[in-house]
Structures are given as C-alpha cells and as structure tokens.
C-alpha cells in the first residue's frame, strides 16, 4: 500500500473504502453480518489486482480469515457475484 503513504493517498483510500462499504450496505457479502467489517480484494495485489472499488468486497473479519485459509471458502464462488456463497457463519464447514 505504498500509494497510501501520502495524505492524498490516504484520503483517496478512505473514499474508496467508504464507497465499497456503502455499496455493500455495510454487510458482509459472505455471511450477512454487519459487525467487524473489512474489505477483501477479489484479485490480490500480488496477482495484479487493484484497490479500485470493483476489486473490493465487504466481509466481516471472521469470514476474511476463513477466505484466506488454504482450504477455506470457495473463493471462486465468492468472486462470481459477491453473494455466491450461502452458508451459516463463519463458513468453517464449506
């Protein structure tokens, strides 16, 4: 996140973050929770993904941990249309 070291970069990130949270109605796009929210990159920066709102979805921290587990959530389903998964929180049995 080197682009966010400047004041202007931080202001831009806050605007993109707020837009993504509003777009997703402050709701985890995996389990529907409205608590302890963060953003998930659909395509990681390491894979060439950007910090654009179109590459971000709102998830709660519990689901975010599961998404990043090696055998966690079916990320392809999540990426297809944000609500690709229908399971109870925290998706441990997916």
Image (tube, rainbow, N blue to C red):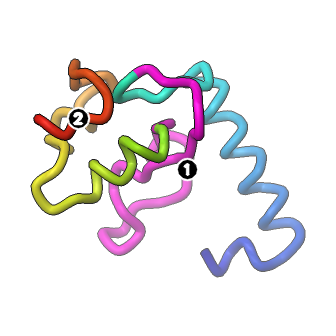
The residue that label 2 is drawn on is 91
Tag count in the figure? 2
Q: Is residue 43 left or right of residue 23?
A: left
Residue 36 in magenta stretch: yes
Which dot marks residue 61? Answer: none
Q: What residue sits 36% from the left and 25% below the top?
A: 31
Mark 2, secondary structure of its residue: loop
55 left or right of 85?
A: right
**Which quadrant of the figure contains the C terminus?**
top left
Residue located 55% across and 50% down the image? 52
Q: Are marks 1 and 2 in contact (CB under 8 Å)?
A: no
Instruction: State which quadrant residue 91 falls in.
Output: top left
The percent position of residue 29, horizontal first and vertical second, equals: 41, 27
Residue sitting at 46 percent across and 38 percent down?
Answer: 59
Q: Secondary structure at mark 1?
A: loop
Q: Foreground residue, 33 or 50?
A: 33
The residues tagged by marks 1 and 2 sit, at their Cα atoms, a distance apart of: 26 Å
Which span of residues is magenta-colored? 32-59
Quarter holding the N terminus is bottom right
What mark, if any, has residue 52 been given in the picture? 1
Vertical side of 73 occupied by 71: above or below: below
Q: Position of residue 39 (x, y in %)?
A: 52, 47
Categorize mark 2 by other alpha carbons within 10 Å: few (<14), some (14-19), many (20+): some
Against 55, residue 50 (above or below) is below
> Is 44 included in the stretch rendered in magenta?
yes
Question: Is residue 65 or residue 41 the one in the foreground?
Answer: 65
Which comes sooner in the sequence, label 1 or label 2?
Answer: 1
Which quadrant of the figure has residue 48? bottom left
Q: Is residue 86 left or right of residue 43?
A: left
């Amino acid at each position: 996140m080197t682009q966010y070291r400047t004041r202007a970069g931080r202001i831009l990130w806050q605007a993109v973050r707020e837009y993504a949270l509003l777009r997703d109605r402050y709701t985890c796009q995996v389990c529907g929770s409205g608590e302890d929210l963060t953003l998930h990159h659909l395509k990681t920066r390491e894979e060439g993904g950007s910090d654009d709102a179109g590459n971000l979805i709102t998830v709660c921290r519990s689901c975010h941990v599961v998404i990043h587990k090696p055998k966690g959530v079916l990320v392809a389903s999540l990426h297809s249309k944000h609500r690709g998964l229908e399971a109870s929180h925290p998706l441990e049995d997916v």
